[in-house]
Image (cartoon, helix red, strand yellow):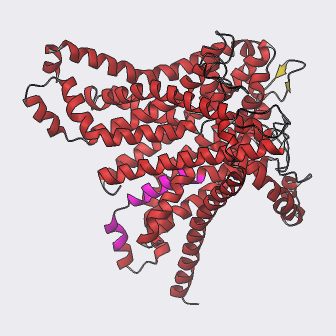
């Protein structure tokens, strides 16, 4: 065999392996999405949304409490996390731009994005559950907010940095103070990007389970009281999937499907906004 | 900037508010470290730091605790999942940057990102109901019949295939971390200047030779950073492994045995801890996990920053 031939074959083999790897990745995606879709659709019932859980072992009932609880926790987390994230990102991109402190906080946030979420759960347990004496919805919301803040902060920083400096100078030249420049000029220019960051961070936390396990815990009854344990979809999925009843498993699949669709839609909307606003990225 | 600040009190107020908001991240990190440390002080005091790390005991009844069994599970699942995920992730990155026609680039990129967006609890549940039966019925018996016969290596595949074991957990974990590694590897590959690649092609290099001798050396820092980042992620992953690991505190030579990781121990036992020393030991585990993953993630970040700096010139 000539050297050329060997090189050609080697190249062909290596490239086919890479192609195989890519299709393996696609295969897992289709396998998992398809599986959740098939099981989820077959378990989908109207009673899921209108009824509270039946006592364990008794068929029927729904997950109304978990849906409401999940939305409530996520909403509260968003209301805490987004202001911190957006304002924090503003500080890094505007007042502290180019300074060492901005760089350090930025790097620390990147690390915080990947810190194990269960550790944040234990932290909140020590701070907000143990002193109060019982699990409560606020603890869950704060735990999710802590996960959210670095995500929103970093995207806000990046998006504000993309706004051309000359735009700010133009506003300064008109005599505007910096805070007005930020709010009326910079935020407006970066609004699409900031919104995307918020959407993606909501997508991120709405699938979180680990930080809720010992903060908001679970509640088999309908409750909107954030001072008490409150049900969430993800913790309910964990409990139901590990439980012994077929009916529980079916409901867990249905709940997974709903969460998955919600998250995928948010993620895709986020991508579309970026594409539409900032062109090809 | 400074002149503007002096003139306007509202500006100073806004500066203060934004500064506090951004410092919250630092406060959280310091707070987590402080709180976990104080909460685990009872456990540290009773067992000592090193003894706790290396003690094989995990006995809530006799109130003897050690991290070794949980650490074992964490290290084994992480290492195996990385071994499975990194080659596939690099393959995906090569495919997307070098091989695929432009029409396919977008969809595959999106598919990989969606794979990353699926919450871990769904991976976990899918693992329990779909992957675990497949593993116990087909893949694990097949492994036992083939590689399991080889001396020494066979040790890894002893026991009854149940599907609820280290191997299944590692596979799920690897599917979860493929997207992270792949997208970072892809971004690093894209940093290779086209001119250098074109020069190699002009010299008659094959496509694989360009990847092997130009693209990979050029992007190795970034790829390595991506791999370390995936390591950090895999270390702290909870729900994807909680379903299929069995939470069995033991050190075993077989990948077909149930085990426990730090995260699985926390998820399963935290709300059940009935004594102070039990809870304190669980906090101690959380502290160990936090410190290790922080160090690993920081290392990854340093590598990625270095890679960025080197090639942005």
Q: Residue at x 79, y 22 (%)?
A: B272
Vertical relation: B153 (above or below) A152: below
Image coordinates for residue B54, horizontal then vertical, percent: 77, 29
Residue B12 quadrant:
top left
Q: Residue at x 65, y 52 (%)?
A: B174
The residue stretch that appears in magenta: B178-199
Q: Is residue A124 left or right of residue A153?
A: right
Image coordinates for residue A3, horizontal then vertical, percent: 53, 85
Residue closer to the observer: B200 or A257: A257
Residue A9 quadrant:
bottom right
Q: Is residue A194 magenta?
A: no
Vertical relation: A109 (above or below) B137: above
Q: Is residue B93 visible?
A: yes
Q: Is residue B180 magenta?
A: yes
Vertical relation: B288 (above or below) B217: above
Image coordinates for residue A256, horizontal then vertical, percent: 66, 45
Q: Is residue B261 visible?
A: no
Residue closer to the observer: A186 or A89: A186
């Amino acid at each position: 065999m000539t050297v050329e031939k060997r090189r050609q074959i080697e190249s062909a083999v290596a490239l086919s392996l890479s192609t195989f790897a890519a299709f393996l990745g696609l295969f897992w995606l289709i396998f998992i999405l398809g599986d959740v879709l098939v099981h989820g659709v077959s378990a989908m019932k109207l009673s899921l949304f209108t009824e509270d859980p039946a006592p364990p072992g008794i068929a029927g009932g729904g997950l109304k409490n978990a849906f409401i609880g999940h939305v409530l926790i996520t909403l509260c987390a968003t209301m805490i996390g987004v202001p911190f994230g957006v304002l924090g990102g503003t500080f890094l991109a505007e007042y502290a731009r180019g300074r060492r402190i901005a760089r350090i906080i930025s790097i620390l946030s990147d690390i915080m994005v990947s810190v194990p979420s269960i550790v944040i759960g234990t932290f909140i347990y020590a701070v907000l559950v143990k002193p109060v004496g019982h699990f409560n919805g606020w603890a869950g919301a704060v735990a999710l907010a802590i996960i959210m803040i670095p995500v929103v902060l970093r995207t806000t920083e990046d998006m504000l940095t993309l706004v051309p400096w000359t735009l700010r100078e133009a506003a300064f030249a008109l005599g505007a103070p910096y805070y007005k420049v930020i709010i009326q000029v910079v935020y407006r220019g970066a609004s699409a990007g900031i919104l995307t960051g918020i959407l993606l961070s909501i997508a991120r936390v709405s699938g979180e389970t680990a930080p809720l396990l010992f903060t908001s815990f679970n509640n088999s009854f309908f409750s909107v009281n954030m001072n008490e344990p409150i049900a969430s979809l993800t913790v309910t999925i964990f409990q139901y999937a590990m439980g012994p009843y077929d009916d529980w498993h079916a409901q867990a699949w249905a709940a997974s499907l709903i969460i998955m669709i919600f998250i995928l839609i948010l993620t895709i909307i986020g991508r579309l906004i970026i594409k539409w606003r900032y062109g090809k990225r | 900037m400074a002149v503007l600040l002096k003139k306007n009190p509202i500006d100073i107020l806004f500066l203060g508010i934004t500064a506090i908001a951004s410092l919250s991240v630092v406060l959280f990190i310091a707070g987590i470290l402080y709180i976990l440390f104080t909460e685990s002080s009872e456990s540290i005091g009773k067992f000592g730091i090193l003894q706790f790390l290396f003690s094989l005991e995990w006995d809530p009844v006799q109130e003897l605790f050690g991290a070794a069994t949980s650490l074992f599970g964490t290290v084994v699942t992480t290492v195996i999942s990385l071994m499975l995920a990194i080659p596939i992730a690099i393959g995906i990155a090569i495919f997307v940057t070098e091989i695929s026609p432009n029409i396919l680039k977008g969809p595959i990129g999106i598919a990989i990102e969606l794979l990353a967006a699926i919450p871990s609890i769904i991976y976990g549940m899918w693992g329990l109901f779909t992957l675990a039966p497949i593993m116990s019925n087909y893949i694990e018996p097949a492994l036992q019949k083939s590689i399991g016969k080889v001396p020494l290596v066979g040790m890894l595949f002893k026991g009854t295939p149940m599907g609820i074991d280290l191997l299944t957990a590692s596979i799920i974990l690897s599917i979860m971390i493929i997207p992270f590694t792949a997208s970072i590897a892809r971004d690093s590959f894209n940093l290779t200047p086209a001119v250098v690649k074109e020069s190699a092609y002009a010299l008659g290099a094959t496509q694989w030779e360009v990847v092997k001798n130009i693209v990979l050396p050029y992007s190795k820092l970034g790829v390595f950073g991506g791999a370390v980042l995936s390591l950090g992620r895999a270390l702290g992953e909870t729900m994807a492994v909680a379903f299929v690991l069995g939470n069995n505190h033991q050190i075993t030579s077989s990948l077909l045995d149930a085990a426990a990781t730090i995260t699985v121990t926390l998820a399963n036992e935290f709300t059940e801890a009935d004594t102070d020393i039990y809870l304190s030991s669980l906090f101690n585990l959380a502290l160990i996990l936090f410190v290790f993953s922080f160090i690993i993630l920081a290392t990854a970040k340093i590598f990625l920053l270095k890679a960025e700096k080197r090639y942005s010139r």
